[in-house]
Image (cartoon, helix red, strand yellow):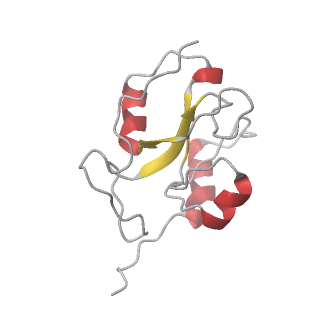
């Protein structure tokens, strides 16, 4: 099976420069998240180890507009963190999360409005930059 090829620039490459990833800087176009293809995409995989890649919210929006036709086992995934790691313990300690994500398969009768209200306490409150 051929490995899907990335068609979007990696972190900072779209402008030719790196960018600050501190919480006082946020760009939905430039902020890069940990990503890969398929459930086994990892630099530590036993078979076919590969470095993790990045994707932006713009990349995700493009996939929403034109969804790729791939099996889930080979489709692109992302972790809404700037840290390139699939290790939960590493993400908990060093990950910088820029989006709240929930995979809710069985909402038990809750509406989308109910779910949004339940997530409200976790919403990022942007404060003035620290001088």
Residue at figure coordinates x 54%, y 62% from the top left: 96
Using the image as rendered, state which of residue 1 and residue 59 is in the foreground.
Answer: 1
Residue 111: quadrant of the picture: top right
| Residue at the outermost left position | 15
| Residue at the outermost bottom position | 131
Badge count: 0
Residue at figure coordinates x 56%, y 48% from the top left: 113
Seen in the image, is 63 located left or right of residue 115?
Answer: left
**In the rendering, at what x and y percent does residue 34 appear?**
53, 46
Using the image as rendered, state which of residue 21 and residue 63 is in the foreground.
Answer: 21
Q: Quadrant of the C terminus?
A: bottom left
**In the rendering, at what x and y percent does residue 24 appear?**
38, 71
Q: Is residue 88 above or below residue 36?
A: below
Residue at figure coordinates x 27%, y 44% from the top left: 14
Residue 62: quadrant of the picture: top left
Residue at figure coordinates x 63%, y 46% from the top left: 102
**In the rendering, at what x and y percent does residue 27 appear?**
33, 56
Q: Is residue 16 above or below residue 25?
A: above
**In the rendering, at what x and y percent does residue 80 appear?**
53, 50
Seen in the image, is 56 located left or right of residue 116?
Answer: left
Q: Quadrant of the N terminus?
A: top right
């Amino acid at each position: 099976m051929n490995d899907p090829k990335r068609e979007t620039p990696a972190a900072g490459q779209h402008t030719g420069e790196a960018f600050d990833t501190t919480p006082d800087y946020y760009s939905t176009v430039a902020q890069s998240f940990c990503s890969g293809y398929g459930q086994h995409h990892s630099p530590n995989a036993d078979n076919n180890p590969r470095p993790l890649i990045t994707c932006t919210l713009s990349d995700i929006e493009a996939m929403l507009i034109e969804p790729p036709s791939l099996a889930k086992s080979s489709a692109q995934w992302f972790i809404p963190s700037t840290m390139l790691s699939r290790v939960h313990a590493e993400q908990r300690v060093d990950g910088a999360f820029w989006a709240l994500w929930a995979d809710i398969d069985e909402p038990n009768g809750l509406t989308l409005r109910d779910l949004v209200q339940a997530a409200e306490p976790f919403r990022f409150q942007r404060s003035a930059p620290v001088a």
